[in-house]
Image (spheres, helix red, strand yellow):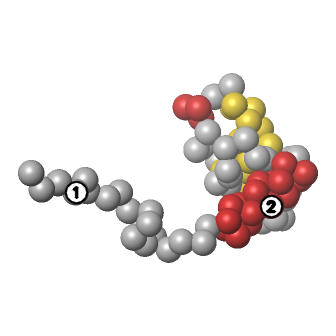
């Protein structure tokens, strides 16, 4: 059993439920209004119930963005082909 985050479009409530992986995408009844709630995508291990973990995940992502000084495909980050020495 895993914990999944669900959001109700009617009352905008968010709540967690433990369910099997086979049932995770099926809608559930909202505990507040009784409407059908759909599963909300989350980062693995960071759930709405633990707001401190969610803040830590955002801080880590921002820190990693700051450290990245090179653009994708820059010459120093691309693997270089070995140069053949003249005989």
Q: Secondary structure at mark 2?
A: helix
Residue, far top: 1
- Rendering quarter of residue 66: bottom right
Q: Residues within 10 Å of mark 2 (few under 14, many from 20)?
A: few
Q: Quadrant of the N terminus?
A: top right
Residue 14 in the image: state x and y as whole percent: 82, 55
Q: Residues within 10 Å of mark 1 (few under 14, many from 20)?
A: few
- Tell me if residue 62 comes above or below residue 86 in the rendering: below
| SS of the residue under disc 1 | loop
Disc on res. 83: 1
| Snapshot quadrant of residue 56 | bottom right
For the residue pair 4 and 46, the one nearer the viewer reads as 46
Residue at the outermost left position: 87
Indicate the position of residue 62 as horizontal and vertical percent values. 74, 66
Disc number for residue 53: none
In depth, the one of 29 and 81 nearer the eye is 81
What residue is rendered at 60% in x and 72% in y? Answer: 69
Label disc, if present, on residue 59 of the rendered structure = 2
Closer to the camera in the image, 70 or 15: 70
Q: Is residue 2 left or right of residue 54?
A: left
Given the current orientation, which residue lies at the most extreme front position?
87
Name which of mark 1 and mark 2 comes first in the sequence: 2
Pair 1/2: label in front: 1
In this rendering, does residue 36 appear at all? no
User: In whole angstroms, how far apart are the C-alphas of marks 1 and 2?
Assistant: 41 Å
Quarter-of-image position of residue 83: bottom left
Residue 44 position in % (x across, y down): 67, 44
Residue appearing at x 89%, y 53% in the figure:
51
Q: Nearer the viewer, residue 15 or 50?
A: 50
């Amino acid at each position: 059993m895993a914990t999944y985050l669900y959001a109700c479009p009617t009352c905008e409530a968010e709540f967690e439920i433990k369910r099997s992986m086979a049932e995770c995408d099926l809608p559930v009844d909202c505990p507040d209004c009784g409407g059908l709630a759909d599963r909300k995508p989350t980062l693995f291990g960071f759930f709405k119930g633990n707001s401190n973990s969610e803040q830590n995940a955002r801080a880590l992502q921002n820190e990693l963005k700051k450290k990245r000084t090179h653009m994708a495909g820059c010459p120093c980050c691309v693997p270089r082909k070995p140069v053949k020495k003249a005989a």
